[in-house]
Image (cartoon, grey):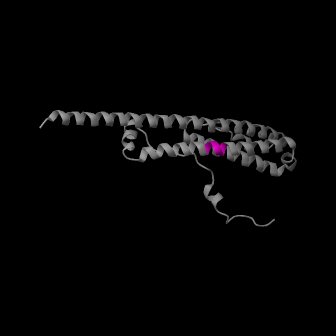
């Protein structure tokens, strides 16, 4: 029996395996780049939303100078580097917006001012852009997570030290799914 053919076959299998591993590694690296790029779009939307919130705060401060406690909690509103920090920034921005509107309940003339209404409209548009950006990021994360957990790709992912990535979160998802607390009175 000629063992040269066996060694050639084993060598060919090893070469094909190495080529496959390199291809899979490159695919995972490309996914990481796409995720970082799409996350930058979320960061841009957060910065834009932050700037609008700051404008709303200026208006709110002019109406409610004695309600300083509302305006103190403005740390980490802009953007985050990690996904956890981005989720934290989203929650912080949402909390400050709720506080601004709570102040507005005490000052109805503030809520009805044209400048505040324009900013409210801008926040609404920015929320739509932010939601779209978050969907894109989460879709990209889903793609890489699927590759990371699927065998044999999971082997290459573990060699690269990759683990499943955390999705950007939506605030109050369970509350938004339920209509139990809906006020039916008009």
Left or right: residue 37 compared with residue 148 = right
| Residue 13 drawn in magenta | no
Between 106 and 115, the one nearer to me in the picture: 115
Q: Is residue 133 magenta?
A: yes
Which quarter of the image is occupied by the N terminus? top left
* Residue 165 visible to the viewer: no
| Part of the protein shown in magenta | 130-134
What x and y, as percent, mark residue 177?
63, 60
Residue 65 located left or right of residue 126: right
> In which quarter of the view is residue 55 placed?
top right
Q: Position of residue 87 (x, y in %)?
A: 59, 44
| Main secondary structure along the magenta-highlighted residues | helix
| Residue 79 falls in image quadrant | top right
Residue 11 picture location, percent across and down? 25, 33
Indicate the position of residue 118 as horizontal and vertical percent values.
Answer: 82, 42
Quarter of the image where the C terminus is located: bottom right
Residue at coordinates 85% horizontally, 45% vertically from top-left? Answer: 110
Q: Quadrant location of residue 161? A: top left
* Of residues 78 and 153, the one drawn nearer to the viewer in this rendering: 153
Residue at x 39% of width, y 43% of height: 153
**Residue appearing at x 81%, y 48% in the figure:** 104
């Amino acid at each position: 029996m000629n063992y040269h053919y066996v060694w050639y076959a084993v060598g060919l299998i090893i070469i094909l395996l190495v080529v496959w591993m390199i291809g899979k590694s490159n695919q995972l690296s490309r996914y990481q780049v796409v995720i970082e790029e799409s996350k930058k779009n979320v960061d841009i939307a957060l910065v834009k939303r932050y700037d609008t919130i700051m404008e709303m705060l200026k208006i709110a401060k002019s109406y409610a100078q004695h309600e300083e406690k509302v305006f103190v909690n403005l740390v980490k509103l802009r953007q985050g580097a990690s996904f956890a920090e981005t989720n934290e920034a989203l929650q912080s921005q949402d909390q400050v917006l709720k506080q601004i509107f709570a102040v507005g309940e005490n000052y109805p003339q503030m809520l009805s001012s044209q400048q505040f209404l324009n900013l409210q409209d801008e926040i609404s548009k920015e929320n739509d852009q932010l939601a779209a950006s978050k969907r894109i990021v989460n879709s990209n994360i889903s793609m890489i997570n699927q590759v990371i957990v699927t065998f044999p790709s999971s082997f290459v992912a573990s060699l690269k030290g990759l683990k499943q990535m955390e999705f950007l979160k939506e605030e109050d998802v369970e509350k938004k799914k339920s209509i139990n607390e809906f006020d039916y009175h008009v």
